[in-house]
Image: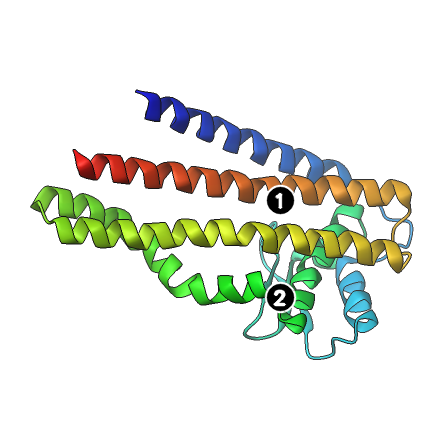
Amino acid sequence: MGFYVIGGIAFIASMLVQWRLKTAYAVWGKVRNSQNMTGAEAAARILQANGIRNVQVAPIPGKLTDHYDPRKKIVRLSEGNYGQRTVAALGVAAHEVGHAMQDAQGYAPMQIRGKLVPVASLGSSMAPYMIFGGMLLNAAGLITLGIVLFAAAVLFQFVTLPVEFDASRRAVAQLDSLGIVDPVEKAGVTRVLNAAGLTYVAAAATSFTYLLYFILASRR
């Protein structure tokens, strides 16, 4: 019973965090920034200021689909953030450039996360089927392998936390030092990025809860 209470709390917390992000983004996604700068322009400005010339900035369909692709060296911004001149667009664009800065500087947690991607991807997609399949077949080895793979996925989630929070820290610092945001806009950017960061915390906590469930279930 205790596990289900913890699981329920984790689920509710995750929903609240998602609501907080949507609210912050909705508010600052309507506020035009004082520099009248698009997300794409802000990203290019920060890249140039830091001497990063091998990274491109490109739009990608969807909402909040923004990410940095370290393999292709591309900062991909969702269509809204790419072309909009809002405070939220500046924050999201600067955050993704923060990842490009991490990549250029060989930021250790980002490198570790990159190495975990293959096994974490396998763990998140296949491990639950392996665990429950092992239970049905009474195959202890399959259960153990599934739990190990899922544990790798959980580790990936926790390694992601310093990567994301550091990228946000870099984003706010760059926007501030380059004079792209004023104090009020800086506060808005910080609110949006902090809300986004909490989604990763919630995801890590939820994944850890599932890992505990799988371990307990396997012992039964």
Q: Which quadrant of the figure has residue 43? A: bottom right
How many discs appear? Answer: 2
**Residue under pointer 1:** 197
Work out whether residue 62 or residue 34 is closer to the camera in this orientation and state it: 34
Residue depicted at 48% across the width and 42% down the height:
203
Q: Earlier in the sequence, mark 1 or mark 2?
A: 2
- In the displayed structure image, the side of residue 7 where residue 97 appears, left or right: right
* Quarter of the picture holding the N terminus: top left
Of badges 1 and 2, nearer the viewer stands 2
Q: Position of residue 86 (x, y in %)?
A: 80, 48
Q: Secondary structure at mark 2?
A: loop
Q: Position of residue 123 (x, y in %)?
A: 33, 55
Q: Is label 1 in contact with label 2 (beta carbons under 8 Å)?
A: no
What is the C-alpha distance between the residues marked 1 and 2?
A: 18 Å
- Which amino acid, mark 1? Gly
Residue sitting at the far bottom:
54
Q: Which quadrant of the figure has residue 178? A: bottom right
Q: Is residue 28 among the parts visible in the rendering?
A: yes
- In the displayed structure image, the side of residue 109 where residue 77 appears, left or right: right
Q: Is residue 84 among the parts visible in the rendering?
A: no
**Residue under pointer 2:** 107
Q: Secondary structure at mark 1?
A: helix
Residue depicted at 85% across the width and 44% down the height:
185
Q: Position of residue 114 (x, y in %)?
A: 49, 66
Determine which of the numbered discs, if any, sits on residue 103 in the image: none
Work out whether residue 98 or residue 27 is closer to the camera in this orientation and state it: 98
